[in-house]
């Protein structure tokens, strides 16, 4: 047998630590990886917020000289890039990681080490994008990186190269995570949980993951083309060589519009969990919400040129993209009506999570309606590149995605930590964010329609925009204060530590059936699912007939779920080759085989990071990074998911 | 081939019928599909978009070069047809390699997997020589948009083939030493999915670059630019 066992020389033993920093570096636990995503993304959120406030200070008066045009360009570029790729996407990923295995009744994701790899690549890519702040070369070509402005001729220096390479690394991280969640949701569902019994958040995660997996490669292509243009003098966006700068816009927005739905769909999923729980009603029209999500994801591929109405694509293209853009408002509207109908005649509890969710509906509707306005090219010609557009997408991304994410934080915090967040501070947090956000962005509609251009570091005194801008800046600081209150709330609640039970909100989905916080193995016993909102109907069997009709639910129970208790291990999905112990109690993970920890994900990610630095500096660095990369790759592929000795313990 | 099977003890446990039963065995997952296989299929979907964006770039930019060398002056279709044939035959070797691994015939399996490595390597060699000749004849990624799109698209594909060749080389080694057997033939099957995909992409690239663009010369009015 010794000739059969292929071992890769280990420089240090496999991590086993349960506490301390090494337990985090070697972790493959989906909950810990979710926490890592959340903390990292929140730090980037604070940095992006500071960038935004610096811009608001600059714009608070006309002809201000607080920051110069060069710094301003870097600020709006990095604010946008950070918020999109380093805040909203990874905050969503934090929720995916934490909740998907819990919601589908699994013990981890399908590929735990790949999951860890996603996080480490994300971390290194995010550092690389921001490295420019340290070297004085922060990216300054906008988060959209339009050619030829992002090309080497008009944008010398390393800034946009950091940006392109950093985004490519983030793309690898996102695709790996997306693949992982698609397989997890399709393959690791608890027995009996058919696709239409999935919680809506899981559905939206699946749809988002599919979008990520299909859209991020296009961004990778754009990044590679921009890099080769900048580094090796190719002609992709160089008209003198036969290229075309408009091509960049097509490729970027072909990625960029699905990206918009990557940002909003997870928040829609969160809201679809929070509203039913605090209305004590099932989600109204579950199949419609799911199908609307699918339709949005599909149609999201056919609207990208509405970002390019003023490029001059001609009336045929503009008309086609107008129609598709207006049509995509329909499934979104369906969802909004579903959420409202969910609350209708519900037994509503207005706590912080619910307030954030209700604000999400209102703010997202406003942002959606202004979006319909510039779906018409004639109106868009007036609004393009003005603060009206800025107001529009902040209403959908802050008023939509971010409020949705905060709702999720308040809703699931007791599950994540085992203690509640303080409700009084929570409501203050919500009120300040909601009011500050509206004071900041509602006035920008007016100055936008008045023609105030975005991405310009200042404006003339006689334009009459000073008062409105000052108001917006004040609103920005109120919003910032709201975030500060949130951080105070984290500290205060940690000190108060009001302990939460397993099911603090009288929840509906499986994550509330396990303890708060969940044990490392998530579930002592893998649940048998019979209904949509299974946990609720098991708690309140008397409501089954009301929602399912008499006898109908019997047909929805698959035969596999009826197997008697002693033999039903056969019908359970395999996590990592282990069997599930039924009598697993507090110390049950001795019998449940969780995947072992591993250092190879972070080693592989460091190798990729060195490659990225090599592209920025010298090819010799790439050669130097190759051993690290190869070490990570081969160590990984020859390392068993579970070491044999741990299986026997 | 019982003599071969004896060298790989675990494969001995299964008769060919049992092996077949194992291959079509229902996986213990919600969909009944193996998770790693599903991961590879999903990844290939992602890779379709990656190649798709490069191929779309090539098609949009086709015939837009303002100066030579133009495709009609430089592409050597007979030579590339040979390398295309070589790559397609590697898919045949791949299928046979997987067949013999499942049958437990170790030596034949090793031979055919090595055949994949060899044929893939020959394809890469053709590509390296082709790139070299093009550069000598004056086509570089910098010289015009045809050069840019040609080298990046075929180069990215070549990188995919190279990764596949390295992967297959390790699997051939695994088959030789007896670690790749009928009961873990899935390892080879998943690599095979990747390999066939890369082949199929080449069929599209060969059609788009070599066949459709074969007669692309200067665009109308290009002579005015250069007197």
Image: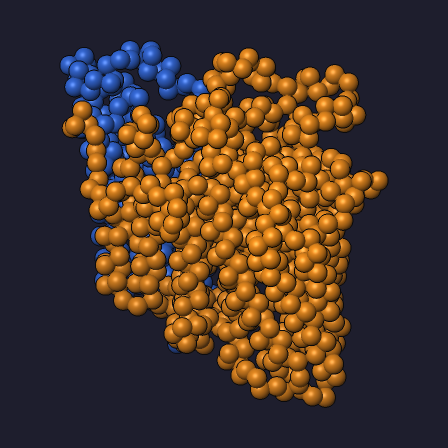
Residue A592, can we see it?
yes
Does residue B204 lie above or below A573 as drawn? below
Pick the residue in front: A350 or A440: A350
Say left or right for A472 vs B171.
Answer: right
Q: Quadrant of residue A359?
A: bottom right
Q: Quadrant of residue A197?
A: top right
Q: Residue at x 29, y 11 (%)?
A: B15
Q: Outermost residue toward the front? A: A496
Q: Which chain is orange?
A: A
Pick the residue in front: A365 or A221: A365
Residue A412: x percent and y percent?
61, 45
From the image, which quarter does the N terminus of chain A lie in? top left
Q: Residue at x 56, y 26 (%)?
A: A527
Q: Outermost residue toward the right? A: A345
From the image, which quarter does the C terminus of chain A lie in? top left
Residue A376, can we see it?
no
Does residue A499 lie above or below A2 as drawn? below
Residue B181: x percent and y percent?
26, 23
Does residue B114 lie above or below A72 as drawn? above
Q: Quadrant of residue B67?
A: bottom left
Residue B200: x percent and y percent?
39, 39
Q: Colour of chain B?
A: blue
- Figure colour scheme: by chain
Q: Residue at x 41, y 76 (%)?
A: A136
Q: Residue at x 49, y 49 (%)?
A: A35
Residue A256: x percent and y percent?
56, 57
């Amino acid at each position: 047998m010794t000739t059969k066992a292929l071992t890769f020389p280990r420089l240090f033993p496999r991590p086993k630590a349960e506490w301390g920093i090494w337990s985090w570096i070697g972790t493959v636990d989906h909950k810990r990886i979710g926490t890592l995503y959340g903390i990292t993304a929140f730090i980037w959120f604070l940095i992006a917020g500071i960038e935004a406030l610096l811009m608001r200070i600059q714009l608070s008066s006309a002809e201000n000289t607080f920051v110069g045009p060069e710094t301003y360009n870097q600020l709006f570029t990095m604010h946008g890039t950070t918020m999109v790729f380093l805040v909203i996407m990874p905050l969503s990923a934090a929720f995916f990681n934490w909740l998907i295995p819990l919601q589908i009744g699994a013990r981890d994701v399908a590929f735990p080490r790949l999951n860890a790899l996603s996080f480490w690549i994300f971390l290194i890519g995010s550092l690389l994008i921001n490295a420019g702040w340290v070297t004085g070369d922060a990216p300054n070509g906008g988060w959209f990186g339009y050619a030829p402005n992002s090309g080497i001729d008009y944008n010398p220096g390393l800034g946009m190269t950091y940006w392109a390479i950093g985004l490519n690394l983030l793309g690898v991280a996102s695709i790996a995570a997306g693949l992982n969640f698609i397989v997890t949701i399709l393959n690791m569902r608890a027995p009996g949980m058919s696709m239409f019994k999935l919680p809506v958040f899981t559905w939206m995660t699946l749809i988002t993951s599919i979008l990520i997996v299909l859209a991020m490669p296009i961004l990778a292509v754009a990044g590679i083309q921009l890099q080769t243009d900048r580094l090796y003098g190719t002609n992709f966006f160089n008209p003198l060589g036969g290229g075309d700068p408009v091509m960049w816009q097509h490729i970027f927005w072909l990625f960029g519009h699905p990206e918009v739905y990557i940002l909003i769909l997870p928040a829609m999923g969160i809201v679809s969990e929070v509203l039913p729980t605090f209305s004590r009603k099932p989600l109204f029209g579950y199949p419609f919400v799911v199908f609307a999500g699918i339709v949005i994801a599909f149609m999201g591929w056919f609207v990208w040129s509405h970002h390019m109405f003023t490029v001059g694509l001609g009336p045929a293209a503009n008309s086609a993209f107008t129609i598709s853009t207006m049509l995509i408002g329909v499934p979104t509207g369906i969802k909004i009506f579903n959420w409202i109908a969910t609350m209708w005649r519900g037994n509503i509890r207005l706590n912080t999570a619910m307030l954030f969710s209700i604000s999400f509906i209102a703010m997202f509707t406003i942002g959606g309606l202004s979006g319909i306005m510039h779906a018409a090219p004639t109106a868009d010609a007036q609004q393009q590149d003005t603060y009206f557009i800025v107001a529009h997408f902040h209403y959908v991304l802050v008023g939509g995605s971010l409020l949705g994410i905060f709702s999720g934080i308040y809703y699931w915090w007791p599950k994540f930590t085992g203690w509640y967040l303080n409700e009084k501070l929570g409501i203050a947090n919500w009120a300040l964010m909601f009011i500050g956000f509206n004071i900041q962005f509602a006035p920008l509609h007016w100055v936008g329609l008045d023609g105030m251009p975005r991405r310009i570091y200042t404006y003339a005194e006689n334009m009459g925009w000073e008062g409105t801008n000052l108001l917006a800046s004040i609103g920005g600081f109120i919003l910032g204060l709201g975030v500060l209150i949130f951080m105070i709330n984290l500290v205060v609640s940690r000190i108060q530590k009001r302990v939460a039970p397993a099911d603090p909100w009288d929840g509906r989905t499986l994550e509330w059936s396990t303890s708060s916080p969940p044990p490392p193995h998530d579930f002592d016993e893998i649940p048998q699912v019979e209904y949509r909102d299974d946990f609720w109907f098991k708690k309140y069997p008397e409501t089954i007939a009301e929602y399912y009709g008499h006898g109908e639910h019997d047909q929805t129970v698959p035969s596999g779920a009826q197997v008697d208790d002693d033999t039903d291990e056969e019908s359970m999905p395999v996590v990592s080759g282990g069997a599930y112990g039924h009598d697993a109690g507090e110390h049950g993970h001795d019998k449940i085989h969780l995947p072992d920890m591993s250092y190879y994900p972070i080693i592989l990610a460091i190798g990729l990071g060195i490659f990225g630095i090599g592209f920025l500096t010298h090819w010799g660095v790439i050669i130097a990074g190759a051993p690290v990369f190869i070490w990570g790759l081969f160590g990984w592929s020859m390392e068993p998911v579970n070491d044999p000795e741990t299986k026997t313990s | 081939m019982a003599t071969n099977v004896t060298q790989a003890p675990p494969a001995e446990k299964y008769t060919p019928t049992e092996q077949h039963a194992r291959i079509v065995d229902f996986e213990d997952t919600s969909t009944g599909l193996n998770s790693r296989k599903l991961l590879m299929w999903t990844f290939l979907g992602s890779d379709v978009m990656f190649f798709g964006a490069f191929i779309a770039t090539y098609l949009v930019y086709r015939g837009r070069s303002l100066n030579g060398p133009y495709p009609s002056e430089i592409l050597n279709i007979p030579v590339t047809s040979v390398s295309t044939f070589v790559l397609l035959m590697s898919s045949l070797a791949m299928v046979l390699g997987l067949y013999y691994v499942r049958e437990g015939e170790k030596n034949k399996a090793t031979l055919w997997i090595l055949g994949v490595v060899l044929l893939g390597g020959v394809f890469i060699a053709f590509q390296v020589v082709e790139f070299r000749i093009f550069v000598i004849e004056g086509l570089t990624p910098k010289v015009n948009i045809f050069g840019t799109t040609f080298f990046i698209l075929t180069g990215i594909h070549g990188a995919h083939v190279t990764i596949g060749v390295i992967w297959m080389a390790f699997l051939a080694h695994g088959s030789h030493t007896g670690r790749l057997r009928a009961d873990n033939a899935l390892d080879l099957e998943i690599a095979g999915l990747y390999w066939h995909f890369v082949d199929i992409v080449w069929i599209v690239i060969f059609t788009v670059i070599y066949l459709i663009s074969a007669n692309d010369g200067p665009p109308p009015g290009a002579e005015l630019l250069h007197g």
